[in-house]
Image (cartoon, grey):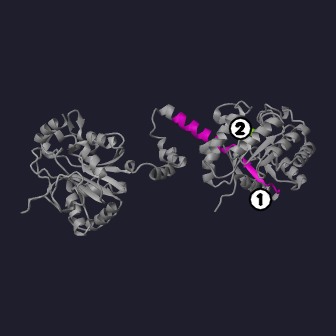
């Protein structure tokens, strides 16, 4: 359904047959908060906008600075903004230009007050402020109305006669003249702490055109009183800026005094809430739509184990944090990922999890790492699963091209298998891969499927070793999520490994593709491996 124009929305508010409310905002964030609260319109308050700039409400901020701020406010909201346009920032000609610029920025209307430029806030010596000449002000209203392109753009005329002490008759006279000049509504302002003069005005006015009030000073008046008086629109004129000043002063003083953040954390918005208000989600969706697929890949690194065969080297850190040639294994892997534009990495930690202190990664902890195996660790990252993932062991050392080529390979789940069975660099007992076809060393070899992964050598010669790295795409992710659900029901779930998961999928008839390589990787299991790794990275 097409959205109602903002100008029309404002006009509907002004002309509504029930009392309506708009709330002050002074920048993009506050405008968004006002909309989220449920308000149907924003008051672009001159006082608040000048205050957030840190200047006085005396036209110290230029009108273009005000209009620039309105643009931010309008861009992030779907509700209309009525600008507090002070005196129109000059004569009829300035008013024409103002209306033109406001319409260009989708601002729904402007309220101008019958004072003289430069004005000051009505609550500062209001009675001393000179009022505009009635004819001159009517000319300004007419000029504004004549220059608007959208018929629904609203001009509200604000009568300052009561503030300036000119009395009720003058206020009514001015209001009537402004109405006749084409104003879409009259704002009758008062600085009394009781609503008496505003109510008296409303009674005399008798609905000649929409009536707007700003009950800042007579705030204790029950809202029903305004309803009964036939007021159309109430402006809560400065409550967002006042709320933020109170909060900022309190928090600032507290942090200054205690030199700590610990007590304030629960009193303030979370950083995530800021992201929410900024619309971070929308950007994420847009990235999914417009950025190349590769950057949507996330990596899951299984790094919960100690690697006790490495003795004192892993006394205070897990295997993945062992330093090889000046860099930890994990750092090396993350650097390779970054070269491929993969910046979203989840590391599953367990043993000495705190030692994994690489910035910019998501860390998930497998709390049961002592009594569980790889699959439990992997399942800890289930929340991080995406439609395109790379999964590998944290103790893997590999040449960058292996991962790059894996990204090019097709298949919902693809495992990397080293067909060099005589690789002299291998120690321990890598998983044996039995595949549908042997490696024919053709770099474009396709359609090889994994038949089984096994720890023990079978009677048959394996096709190669699974190196501990796999790629999972959207459908593959669904298979895995389902398989995890099934396997979790087994009593021995905690003893299961990634090969067990892959074998389970094969038994269920799911195709696991194979990407063959020829050496150039190392699984760091022993002190010998570390020596070999040194050569490997040299
Ligand atoms: C404003 O919000 O800037 C106003 C209303 O003009 S008042 O401050 O009440 O005059
Ligand atoms: Mg103002």
Q: Is mark 1 within 8 Å of ligand 1?
A: no
Magenta-drawn stretch contains 48: no
Q: Quadrant of the N terminus?
A: bottom right
* Numbered tag placed on residue 382 in the rendering: none
483 over 254 or under it: above or below: below
* Magenta-drawn stretch, dominant element (helix, strand or loop): helix
The picture quadrant where one finds residue 166 is top right
Secondary structure, mark 2, is helix
Query: N-terminal of the two: label 2 or label 1?
Result: 1
Task: Give the x, y percent position of residue 303.
Answer: 25, 48
Single out the mark in the foreground, 2 or 1.
1
In the rendered image, which residue does mark 1 sit on?
16
Is any atom of residue 379 visible in this view?
A: yes
- Please indicate whether residue 214 sits to the left or right of residue 417 in the image: right
The picture quadrant where one finds residue 440 is bottom left
* Numbered tag placed on residue 47 in the rendering: 2
Q: Which residues fall within the magenta stretch?
A: 229-254
């Amino acid at each position: 359904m097409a959205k109602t124009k903002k100008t029309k929305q404002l006009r509907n508010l002004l002309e509504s047959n029930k009392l309506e409310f708009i709330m002050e905002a002074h920048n993009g964030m506050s405008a968004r908060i006002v909309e989220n609260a449920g308000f149907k319109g924003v008051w672009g308050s001159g006082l608040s906008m000048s205050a957030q700039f840190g200047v006085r409400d005396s036209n110290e901020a230029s009108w273009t600075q005000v209009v620039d701020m309105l643009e931010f406010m309008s861009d992030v909201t779907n509700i209309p903004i009525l600008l507090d346009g002070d005196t129109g920032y000059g004569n009829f000609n300035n008013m024409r230009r103002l209306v033109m610029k406001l319409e260009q920025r989708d601002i729904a209307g402007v309220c101008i007050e019958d004072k003289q430029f430069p004005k000051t806030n009505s609550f500062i010596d209001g009675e001393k402020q000179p009022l505009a000449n009635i004819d001159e002000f009517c000319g300004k209203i007419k000029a504004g109305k004549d220059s608007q392109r959208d018929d629904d753009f609203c001009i509200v005329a604000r009568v300052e006669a009561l503030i300036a002490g000119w009395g009720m008759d003058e206020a009514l006279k001015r209001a009537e003249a402004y109405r006749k000049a084409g104003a879409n509504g009259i704002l009758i302002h008062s600085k009394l702490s009781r609503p008496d003069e505003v109510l008296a005005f409303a009674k005399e006015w008798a609905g000649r055109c929409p009536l707007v009030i700003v009950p800042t000073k007579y705030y204790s008046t029950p809202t029903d009183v305004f309803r009964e008086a036939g007021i159309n629109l109430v402006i809560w004129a400065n409550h967002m800026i006042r709320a933020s000043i109170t909060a900022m002063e309190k928090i600032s003083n507290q942090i200054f005094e205690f030199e700590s953040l610990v007590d304030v954390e629960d009193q303030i918005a979370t950083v995530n809430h800021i992201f929410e208000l900024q619309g971070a989600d929308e950007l994420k969706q847009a990235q999914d739509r417009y950025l190349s697929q590769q950057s949507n890949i996330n990596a899951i690194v299984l790094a919960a184990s100690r690697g006790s065969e490495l003795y004192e080297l892993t006394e205070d850190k897990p295997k993945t944090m062992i330093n090889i040639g000046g860099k930890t294994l994990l750092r090396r892997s993350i650097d390779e990922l970054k070269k491929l534009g993969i910046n979203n990495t989840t590391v599953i930690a367990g043993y000495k999890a705190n030692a994994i202190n690489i910035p910019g990664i998501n860390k998930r902890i497998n709390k049961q790492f002592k009594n569980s195996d790889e699959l439990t660790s992997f399942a800890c990252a289930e929340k991080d699963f995406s439609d395109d993932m790379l999964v590998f062991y944290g103790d893997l050392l590999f040449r960058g091209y292996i991962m790059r080529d894996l990204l090019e390979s097709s298949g919902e789940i693809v495992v990397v298998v080293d067909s060099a069975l005589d690789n002299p660099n291998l120690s321990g007992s890598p998983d044996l891969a039995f595949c549908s076809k042997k490696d024919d060393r053709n770099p474009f070899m396709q359609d090889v499927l994994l038949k089984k992964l096994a720890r023990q050598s079978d009677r048959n010669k394996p096709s190669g070793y699974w190196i501990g790295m796999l790629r999972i795409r959207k459908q593959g992710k669904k298979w895995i999520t389902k398989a995890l659900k099934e396997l979790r029901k087994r009593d021995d779930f905690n003893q299961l490994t990634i090969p067990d998961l892959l074998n389970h999928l094969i038994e269920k008839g799911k195709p696991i593709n194979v990407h063959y390589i020829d050496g150039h990787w190392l699984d760091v299991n022993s002190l010998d491996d570390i020596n070999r790794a040194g050569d490997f990275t040299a």
